[in-house]
Amino acid sequence: MSNIKASQTQVHAVLEEWAKATRQNRKDDILKSHVPDLVVFDVLPPMKYESAESYRQSWDDWQPETQGEGQFDLENLSVTVSTDLAFAHCFIRCGGTMPDGHTFHDLVRATFCLKQVDGTWKILHQHISKPIQQSST
């Protein structure tokens, strides 16, 4: 396997593990592959976080508690790598069942920038977005 192919596989595994930890609400594992000075653009206010810690502190305000494992699936994940930098993009299909039985489903876009640090791929930047619904007038 070429170095590029091996790196693509490693980046893919990092992102799938992030999605799995998120799906299972394993809060201590969600940011284990992110650098401390991470920048995150997210769909919910304040929309920009300038560290992994500030992003983590916001979760209790918006992270839904679901019955059992939630849905958080990476769709059409595309990974491009060079020797020590990578970017990836995909859709994320998320959803679940709330404790009151109400269900929710959503589809968002995601882009990630990664860097190889001491032989391990780390997420430097992630951007989660959703198009705004245009109202017809």
Image (cartoon, rainbow, N blue to C red):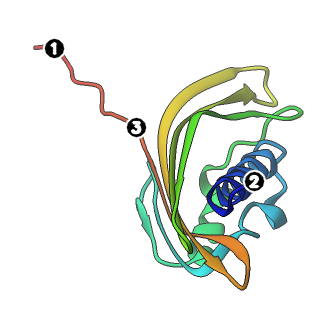
Q: Nearer the viewer, mark 3 or mark 2?
A: 2
Q: Badge 1: how crowded within 10 Å, few (<14), some, or many (20+)? A: few
Q: Kindly identify the amino acid type of the residue bearing the numbered disc 1.
A: Ser
The residue most toward the top is: 137
Q: Which residue is mark 3?
A: 130
Against 133, residue 66 (above or below) is below
Residue 109: x percent and y percent?
46, 39
Residue at image position (75%, 60%) is 30
Q: Which residue is mark 2?
A: 1
Specify the label residue 34 is tagged with. Answer: none
Under circle 2, the secondary element is: loop
The residues tagged by marks 1 and 3 sit, at their Cα atoms, a distance apart of 18 Å
78 and 97: which one is in front? Answer: 78
Q: Contact, CB < 8 Å: mark 2 with mark 1?
A: no
Specify the label residue 136 is tagged with. Answer: 1
| Mark 3 or mark 2, earlier in chain | 2
116 and 56: which one is in front? Answer: 116
Against 10, residue 20 (above or below) is above
Q: Indicate left or right for 91 with 25 as reference.
A: left
Q: Kindly identify the amino acid type of the residue bearing the numbered disc 2.
A: Met
Residue at image position (62%, 59%) is 4
Residue 45: x percent and y percent?
42, 56
Residue 92: x percent and y percent?
58, 36
Against 119, residue 107 (above or below) is above
| Mark 2 or mark 1, earlier in chain | 2
Q: Nearer the viewer, mark 2 or mark 1?
A: 2
Under circle 1, the secondary element is: loop
Residue at image position (72%, 51%) is 9
